[in-house]
């Protein structure tokens, strides 16, 4: 088991290296850098000025070398700025600090994630707060989504073609085919608007004292989460995800229910309830488990729409800001996080798979 | 239990009809079926696939799925009509009073549940037994079905056991609450013959011990003879003949039963002098059944105007023991008349040596544990060890052995799908052991071809039959233009006796036998000199097997092909092979002409194999030799002689050299070779396994 983990970790590291290098190369394309120079210094710079700006800020050197510096395996660049003062990759944090010991290496290996040009603060700090915010959102989505979808899938799949199956199937197809920007708006109209929808009705009936049933804005959830301010974004994402997982669970459940060992169980005299719970369930969960694990990276990056809709400034929102503002370091930071999350969930899903499916363990 | 007593039938099926309902139509699967099983009696249900025998079993269990429904008749179990029971009452009976054993043990055990839990569940449901007591009972029953190390087995998952062990577990599960009726649905079809013999013995013994009645479903007449007291022959949804096993075997009174017996290779059949008589035509589809007698269109005794008018009832055969037949003419037919003399053939003389294998070895390296294992540790699987033989033109060499004996590996090396580890394979003097198929020239590829076991999987489902044969012709570089190739394809269709219009059909529109004919046509497309037939008929029904075998023989006679016939079915090998090679765990343990191999002296493994094969002939007396345990894994073969772990002659060899040394090949004067430590004197004491009592 340990050997397996060690081997997996090594391959994961290699994958992470490759992926981050690709992102690094793409974000550091020449046009991006020129745009950065113009953003940082002056939009009206001449081409020659841009070139010298790039040279002064350490961008004129080979890509691999800069990637090494970013990683922290090569010493950070040093140079002199226009005033003749020493500058360098590792110096930026110590500006104005007298007598500070300036490190030679300052890449992500040293914990230095770089500096965001949009937010004017360290990338590490931004990522920490934004990830926490999105983390809470993901957690609640998972708590709502997984049980709901599994129950729906199992109920639909245990009697294929029954009325229950058909109604649940219609519901899940409808929910996956409704994108978040539709369901989110509908939900806000229904619950989060004081002019229309249920809130208005409820208020007229005197059931609620405030203006709305649930808040259509989740900004306040950044500081503390309540049912009021968090229910709608969580619901919006869950509705989209539930249908998908429920469909997968149903497919796997119907297949299991036609398996011969289910017939064996039935002809042993096991009651239908126990056939489903004791014999079918574990086998039917193997396929959806992989799907659920694949949903986690999707949740991390795919929540952009919902976060924007409910003005919840999480990871997805940050990613969009970084990408649209050419914030190279922040973009790199985001992609590192995304890569790590993807690889980790894959590892977890592989290990979990082994525990769900005893056939994998030995063979 | 109402007013039932053990003198009355335990199961009584009266005029049962079962239909499946599709959107288009009602498909009758079983019609007017009646049978009675007395306490302690074993009833056999025989028929080809699609005749409705499994449907009867599921009907008894009242588990026909959503589309199936019982449309008529009654099924009485201990005097109570099962059709009228509620779900809860049925659940009470299922598993406790009627238990079922299935065809594929692996599929019928829950892969994610421990064996012990699956077994213990039965008494926990039916007797409300406590978990601990149930596990103790499970342990005892696992011992009863003669499985080694019951504690380990109870804690393992199904996939950790071999096929034979899994089937024993399924049997144990059925016996957990001592049922009154046991339904066995082809319980040994997926198993090897020596393992099958063990299971059959076990079932018989347990039947005696617990006094269980049995409904034994099988397509194998030999197996029925071994296990049952009475049998019922089914054809196309109807019972056509029923009676005691001896009476039906020796004094059959229905043309289908007779035709069935004439189409299976029994001892005495010979491909040249007394060829098998295939049943003409095809099994009718359920919605295309003829008027009157279902077997009419294929029957030799058919009388137009009589056999095709109205339903035919089951009628009592006079002077029989509850012997009935569904034939209008059974009293008129002369049942003793020998079959009309079929064509006899001249024995083909083997020609020059075409293929020669010298000391061929094929080893595979496998890593011991793909996941969670100590990496870097590899094991060597010796799939073929020192294979030496030659095959001549127009000769049939049969390669016999059970699963894992290396017969398929050998075929792969010959075909070029794998390259040999050591040794030489010479085809017309040219060495081909190191040339994989993609590097072989067209001539070599087209001269060594293969007919596969499963015709259902080896044809491309989305290409017409004709197109697939033309494709083979293109690959082999036959014919200059598309028109010429199409002509050639039609000739090939004639060769395998398929109507020419089948060329435009899709594989799904063909029956199993017809698909196998297409496979044969494809193999012979490039004028193959050597055809490796890997169990070509084992997936087919009995009545079709004879026709396909005959076809292969006929083409061989015409084309002077060398046929390497891989099979585990010794009856068919005896019928068609000139020489036989018996393999066990990668070793050739015995080789000689068919007569030599089927008569003493035997290799101890051949002896057991011969004894294990069920023969559907009441005249045959067999010595019962049941091997213990399973075939050892090729990953971890026993030291010394590969067969020593199961050999009953081992004690005859002094000094225990069986366990340390691989035996040498003993050549007897006739050229018969046996790989065994036994001496000539030991061999001389061997008695024949199969004896045919004088008629």
Image (tube, rainbow, N blue to C red):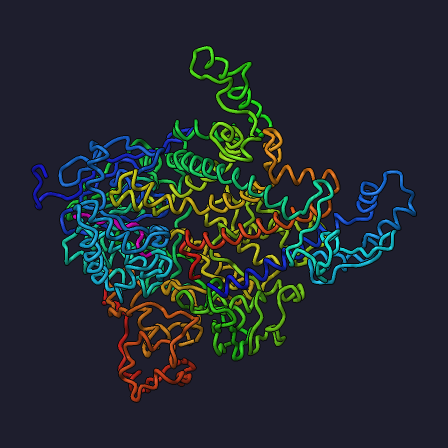
Q: Nearer the viewer, residue B183 or B288?
A: B183
Image position of B529 with respect to A269: above or below: below
Residue at x 53% of width, y 21% of height: A192
- Looking at this rendering, what residue extends furthest in the top direction? A204
Q: Is residue B59 left or right of residue B281?
A: left
Magenta residues, as a range?
B180-188
Q: How many marks?
A: 0
Instruction: Please give left or right for residue B598 compared with residue A93 in the image.
Output: left
The answer to whether B458 appears left or right of A93 in the picture is: left
Residue B516 seen in the figure = no
Residue at 59% from the left image edge and 51% from the top image edge: A340
The residue nearer to you, when weighing B683 against B484, is B683
- Which of the 4 image quarters holds residue B529? bottom right
Residue A221 screen position, x and y as percent? 53, 33
Q: Is residue B655 magenta?
A: no
Q: Position of residue B487 (x, y in %)?
A: 65, 49
Which residue shows up at 52% across the image and 71% down it?
B376
Front-lying residue, B32 or B141: B141
Residue A342 picture location, percent across and down? 58, 49
């Amino acid at each position: 088991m340990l050997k397996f983990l060690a081997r997996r970790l090594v391959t994961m590291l290699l994958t992470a290296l490759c992926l981050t290098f690709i992102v690094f190369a793409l974000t550091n394309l020449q046009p991006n850098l020129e745009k950065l120079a113009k953003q940082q210094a002056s939009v009206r710079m001449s081409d020659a000025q841009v070139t010298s700006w790039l040279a002064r800020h350490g961008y004129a050197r080979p890509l691999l070398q800069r990637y090494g510096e970013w990683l922290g395996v090569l010493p950070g660049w040093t140079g002199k700025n226009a005033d003749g003062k020493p500058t360098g990759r590792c110096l930026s944090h110590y500006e104005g600090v007298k007598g500070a010991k300036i490190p030679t290496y300052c890449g992500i290996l040293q914990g230095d994630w770089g500096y965001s040009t949009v937010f004017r603060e360290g990338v590490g700090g931004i990522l920490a707060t934004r990830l926490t915010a999105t983390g809470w959102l993901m957690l609640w989505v998972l708590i709502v989504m997984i049980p709901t979808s599994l129950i729906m899938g199992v109920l639909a799949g245990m009697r294929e073609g029954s009325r229950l199956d058909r109604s649940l199937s219609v519901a899940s197809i409808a929910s996956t085919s409704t994108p978040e920007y539709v369901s989110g708006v509908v939900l806000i109209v229904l619950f989060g608007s004081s002019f229309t929808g249920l809130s208005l009705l409820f208020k007229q009936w005197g059931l609620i004292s405030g203006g709305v049933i649930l808040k259509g804005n989740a900004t306040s959830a950044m500081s503390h989460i309540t049912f009021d301010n968090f229910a709608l974004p969580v619901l919006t994402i869950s509705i989209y995800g539930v249908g998908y997982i429920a469909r997968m669970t149903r497919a796997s459940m119907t297949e299991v229910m036609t398996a011969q060992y289910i017939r064996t169980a039935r002809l042993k005299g096991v009651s239908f309830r126990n056939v489903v719970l004791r014999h079918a369930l574990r086998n039917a969960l193997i396929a959806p488990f992989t799907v659920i694990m694949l949903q986690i990276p999707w949740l991390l990056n795919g929540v952009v729409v919902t976060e924007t809709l409910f003005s919840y400034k999480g990871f997805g929102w940050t990613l969009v800001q970084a990408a649209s503002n050419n914030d190279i370091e922040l973009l790199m930071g985001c992609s590192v996080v995304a890569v790590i999350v993807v690889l980790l969930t894959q590892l977890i899903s592989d290990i979990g798979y082994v525990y769900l499916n005893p056939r994998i363990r030995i063979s | 239990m109402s007013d039932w007593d053990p003198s009355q039938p335990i199961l009584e099926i009266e005029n049962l009809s079962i239909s499946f309902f599709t959107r288009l139509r009602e498909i009758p699967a079983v019609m007017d079926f009646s049978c009675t099983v007395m306490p302690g009696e074993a009833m056999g249900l025989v028929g080809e696939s699609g005749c409705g025998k499994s449907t009867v079993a599921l009907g008894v269990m009242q588990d026909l799925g959503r589309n199936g429904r019982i449309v008529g008749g009654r099924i009485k179990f201990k005097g109570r009509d099962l059709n009228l029971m509620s779900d809860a009452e049925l659940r009470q009976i299922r598993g406790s009073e009627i238990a079922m054993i299935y065809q594929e043990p692996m599929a019928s055990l829950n892969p994610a549940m421990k064996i012990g839990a699956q077994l213990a569940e039965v008494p926990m449901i039916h007797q409300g037994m406590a978990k601990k007591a149930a596990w103790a009972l499970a342990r005892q029953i696992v011992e009863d079905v003669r499985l080694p190390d019951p504690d380990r087995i109870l804690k393992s998952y199904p996939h950790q056991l071999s096929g034979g062990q899994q089937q024993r577990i399924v049997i144990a599960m059925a016996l957990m609450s001592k049922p009154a009726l046991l339904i066995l649905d082809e319980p040994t079809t997926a198993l090897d013959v020596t393992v099958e013999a063990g299971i059959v013995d076990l079932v018989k013994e347990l039947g005696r011990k617990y006094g269980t009645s049995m409904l034994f479903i099988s397509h194998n007449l030999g197996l029925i003879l071994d296990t049952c007291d009475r049998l019922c022959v089914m054809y196309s949804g109807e019972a056509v003949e029923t009676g005691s096993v001896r009476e039906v075997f020796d004094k059959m009174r229905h043309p289908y039963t007779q035709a069935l017996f004439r189409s299976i290779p029994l001892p005495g059949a010979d491909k040249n002098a007394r060829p098998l008589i295939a049943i003409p035509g095809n099994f009718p589809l359920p919605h295309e059944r003829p008027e009157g007698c279902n077997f009419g269109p294929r029957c030799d005794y058919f009388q137009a105007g009589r056999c095709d008018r109205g339903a035919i009832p089951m009628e009592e055969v006079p002077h029989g023991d509850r012997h009935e037949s569904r034939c209008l003419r059974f009293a008129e037919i002369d049942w003793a008349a020998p079959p009309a003399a079929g064509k006899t053939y001249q024995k083909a003389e083997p020609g020059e040596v075409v293929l020669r294998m010298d000391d061929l070895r094929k080893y595979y390296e496998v890593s011991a544990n793909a996941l969670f294992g100590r990496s870097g540790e590899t094991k060597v699987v010796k799939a073929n060890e020192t294979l030496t033989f030659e095959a001549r033109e127009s000769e049939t060499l049969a390669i016999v052995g059970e699963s894992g004996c290396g017969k398929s590996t050998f075929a792969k090396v010959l075909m070029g799908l794998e390259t040999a580890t050591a040794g030489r394979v010479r085809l017309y003097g040219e060495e081909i052991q190191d040339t994989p198929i993609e590097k072989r020239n067209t001539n070599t590829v087209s001269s060594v071809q293969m007919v596969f076991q499963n015709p259902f999987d080896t044809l491309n489902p989305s290409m017409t039959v004709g197109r697939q044969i033309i494709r083979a012709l293109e690959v082999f570089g036959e014919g200059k233009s598309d028109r010429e190739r199409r002509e050639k394809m039609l000739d090939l269709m004639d060769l395998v006796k398929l109507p020419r219009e089948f060329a435009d059909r899709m594989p799904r529109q063909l029956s199993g036998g017809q698909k196998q004919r297409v496979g044969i046509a494809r193999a012979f497309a490039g004028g193959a000199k050597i055809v490796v037939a890997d169990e070509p008929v084992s997936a087919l029904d009995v009545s079709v097997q004879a026709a396909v075998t005959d076809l292969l023989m006929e083409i061989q006679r015409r084309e002077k092909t060398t046929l390497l016939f891989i099979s585990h079915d010794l009856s068919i090998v005896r019928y068609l092979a000139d020489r036989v090679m018996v393999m066990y765990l990668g070793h050739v343990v015995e080789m000689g002409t068919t007569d030599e191999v089927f008569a003493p002296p035997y290799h101890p493994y051949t002896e057991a194999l011969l004894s294990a094969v069920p023969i559907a002939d009441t005249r045959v007396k067999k010595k019962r030799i049941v091997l213990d345990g399973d075939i050892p894994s090729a990953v971890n073969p026993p030291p010394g002689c590969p067969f020593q772990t199961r050999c009953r002659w081992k004690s005859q060899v002094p000094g225990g050299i069986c366990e340390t040394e691989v035996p040498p090949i003993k050549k007897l004067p006739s050229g018969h070779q046996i790989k065994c430590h036994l001496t000539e004197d030991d061999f001389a004491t061997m008695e024949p396994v199969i004896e045919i009592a004088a008629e």
